[in-house]
Image: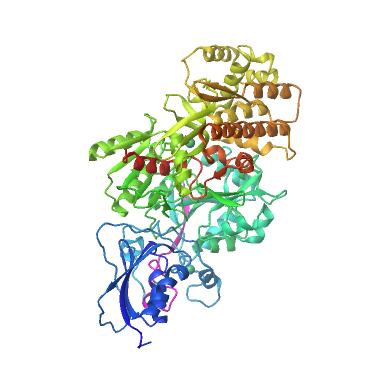
Amino acid sequence: MSESRQQHLEIRVSGTVQGVGFRPFIYRLAREHDLLGTVLNNSRGVVIRAQGSEPALREFLSAIPSGAPPAARVDQVTARELPLDSYTEFRILPSETEGETFTQVSPDLALCDDCRRELVSDDDRRRGYPFINCTNCGPRFTIIRALPYDRPQTTMREFPLCDACRAEYDNPADRRFHAQPVACDDCGPHARFLIARGHTWETESANFRPISSAARALRLGRIVLIQGIGGFHLACDARDENTVRELRRRKQRDEKPFALMVPDEASLRACCEVSSVEWKLLTSRRAPIVLLRRKENAPVAESVAPGNPGLGAMLPYAPLHVLLLREFGGQLVMTSANLRDDPIAYETDDALARMAGIADAALVHDRPIHMFADDSVCKVIGGAARVWRRARGYVPEAVHVPVPFRVPTLAFGPQLKNTFCLGKQSFAILSQHGGDTESALAAEFSERALNHFLRLYDADIRLAACDLHPDYSTTRLAETWCAARGVPLVRVQHHHAHLAACLAENETNERAIGLALDGTGYGSDGTIWGGEALAGDFSSFARLAHLDTVPMPGGDAAAREPWRMALAWLADTFGKEPERRAKRFMDALRSEIRDDSLRALLEATQREGLFPRTSSLGRLFDAVAALVFFGARRQYEGQAAMLLEYLISPAPAVPYPMDVVERNGRWILSPKPLFQELTRDLERGVAAEIIARRFHEGIVAGFCRVCDLARERTGLNTVALSGGCFQNEFLHTNCEKRLTDSGFRVLTHRQVPPNDGGVALGQAVIANAHTMD
Ligand code: ZN
Ligand code: ZN
Ligand code: FE
C-alpha cells in the first residue's frame, strides 16, 4: 500500500445525508480503507477530507453511494484534489456553516428493528423507554429548529446527555454515534398521563406508569389524547362501537373514515387484506397509513369507516406507540387531534386546550414538536405506492426536477389540501400537508410552516408562483408576500400545474398530453375546469379537450351538495322537466327539498350567466352518485364519488356512451347520451353495481378516445395522469391500461399526490420556465 501514490481528496456529498448516520458510516468506511482525514456536516451536506493510497480512495469513493445507510439518499458526490496534509487519524469534526444553505433534512424515521428489540428486551438499559432511537430511526424533521442538524438545533437541546448516552454518542463504533435525539430514561424526555376534569387537566400520581394508565383508560372505553411524532392523536378502542361513535360525536365528524393503528401483523391481517407491496410500505421507515381492503368480520367497529369497504391502517412507528399497543393488546382508532377539518394539534398547551372536552385523558411528553406533520396516507394502485397525503415520513424529502431552478423559487400552492413548494437547484421541496387553508387556523398553520421552511433552508426567494384563482387565500397571501419583498409572482392555471407536477416528478419536461381530472380549478376563461385534456410542458399549455360544461346550481353549494349537480345535468340533458326521465330521483329529492325552491333552482339553472359553469369530472361523479343513491347530501369531499367507486360490479359491462363534438377547435366530451342511458337504467331498476360499472367504463372510454384524437392532431405520444379523480382506482388502472395498450407512454404520480397536494410542485416548475422567456 505504501508503494502507491498518496492522494488527498476533498469529497462533497449532497442529498439526504444528515441525521441518517452518514458521518459514522464515512468514519467506518475511511478506517476500513486506511484513510486519514476528517468528515463534517456543513449547511450544504457532508464534506470529507480523505488522504490515502489512490486505489483505496477509489474504492472509498465508489462505496459512498453504494454502502450508504438505509435512510440516506446520496444525490451527488464530487471530489477535488488537495495538497497532502499531515493527518494522524480519521476524525469527525463539529458541523460548520458555509455560504448558501441547502442541505436536505431527513424526514422522521419509524422505529428501527434494533431499537425495537432493545425496547422490548428484558435487560437493555433502554427497555420500556418510550423515546428510544438511534442514527437509523427517530424524529428528525419535526424536532429540527435550524441547520446544520445538531442536537442544540433540535428540540432535544433541553436534554443534556447523561454519561452513558454521551459515551454512545461519542463512540464511532456505536449505533448511536452522533444520533442527535439519543436519550435514555435518565437524561431524556418523559411521558405523563393526564386526566380531564371538566376543562382542566390533572396529572396522575407519579406512582403509576403513564403508558399503563393510558392503556387502562383505553380498555375502559375512554378517548385518550396521545402525543406522537408530528402531532397529537385521539385514540380509542377500535372494536368498541359505542366509543368510536362517541369519538365521532365529540370530534364533530360524521362519516369520514378514521385510521387504525394495529399492534402487529396478525391483528392487521385479521382486519384487512394485505399484499406484499402493502406490507412493505407499512413496515417501511416512512410507516404511512395505507388504505387496505377490509376483511369480512374484521374485528373493527362499523363506525370506524361507515359504509366503506376499505380501512386505513398503520403500524406503531414511535416507541411510545409500540409500548402502548402491546399493553392495550388490540387495534386503536388513531385520528389526528383536531375538530372537524382543522389542522392537527402539535403544541402541548394548544393540544390540551383544544382537546379539553373531547378527550377523557391524555398521554403527553416533554419532547417538544417543533413542526407538525400529519400521518401520511398511501394507497397501492397498479402495484406501486401512491401517496395521497404527504407528510410524516416523506416531508421534507426533495423531488428531483428535470430543469434546475434558475433562482430560489416559492410556489404557494392551491387552497385545498394545501402544500407549498420550495425550488432550489435541481430540487423541489414540498411542505407537509397543511389542510384546507380556507379555515383561518389552517391558513395560520400553513404560514407557520412556510416561515419555518424559509428559515430552515435560508432561501432567498427571487421568484414566486400561485394559483390563477383570484380569491384563494393562498393567492392573496402570495400577493402580499411578494409585494412586500419585490418578488415577481407568476399565476399558474390549476390543471397546467397538475400536468407539470406529473411531468416533473417523472423527471421529464417533454411536451405531453395531460389528463387533468379533478374537482375544481379556476380556468383561464373564468369557468371552473376539472375534466381537461391539455397539451403542454412547463412553459405553456393548450386546452385540447374538456368535458362539456353545465352551470353549478347555487355556486359553491353545488360542490357540497351533489344533488345540485345531478339537477344541472338532468336539466342539460332533458330540459325543464327532468321528472319525466328521472322520476325516482326527483321524487326522492322532493322529500328533502321544497318543491318551489327546486323549481326556482331549475329555472335559474336555465338562465345564462347566473351560475358559474364547470367542466369538472369530480362534479360529474357527484351528479351520478346523487342519482344512483338518491342522496341529497354528502358528508365530506369526494364521498359521493367514492361510494360510487365502491359499488362497481366486478363483471365488465358495456360503457355508457359519451359524444365527442368539435367546437371552436376543441373537442367537447358530452355526457348527454350517458345520462340518457343511465336514467333509463335507473328507472328500469337495473342494479346499482352495473350502473356504476357502466358509468366508470364510459368515463374511461371517453377520455381515452380524447387522448387518441389528441395524439392524431399533436403527434404527442405521452400522457400524464393527474388530478384528484385518479385516486379512483378503477379510473387510474383502466385509463393506464387502455392508454398503454394503445401505445402511449403513461406517466403517473408516485412521489407527490395526484390531488391538489401536488399542485405546488407544478406551480414551481412552471414559474421557473416562465423566467426563461
Ligand atoms: Zn433505531
Ligand atoms: Zn441518557
Ligand atoms: Fe386539482
Q: Nearer the viewer, residue 486 or 559?
A: 486
Q: Nearer the viewer, residue 628 or 691?
A: 691
Q: How many marks?
A: 0
Residue 321 visible in the snapshot: yes
Quarter of the image with the N terminus in it: bottom left
Q: Residue at x 25, y 62 (%)?
A: 98
- The part of the image, by quadrant, that contains residue 23 is bottom left
Residue 341 visible in the snapshot: no
Q: Nearer the viewer, residue 755 or 545?
A: 545
Q: Which residues are magenta?
A: 168-197
Residue 491, relative to residue 371: is it above or below? above
Q: Residue at x 40, y 57 (%)?
A: 141
- The part of the image, by quadrant, that contains residue 652 is top right
Residue 630 screen position, x and y as percent = 66, 26
Residue 68, relative to residue 618: is it above or below? below
- Prevailing SS of the magenta stretch: loop
Q: Residue furthest bottom?
A: 2
Q: Is residue 625 left or right of residue 489?
A: right
In reply to whether residue 191 is colored magenta, the answer given is yes
Q: How does the figure colour the protein chain or chains?
A: rainbow
- The part of the image, by quadrant, that contains residue 15 is bottom left
Residue 387, relative to residue 40: is it above or below? above
Residue 43 screen position, x and y as percent = 30, 61
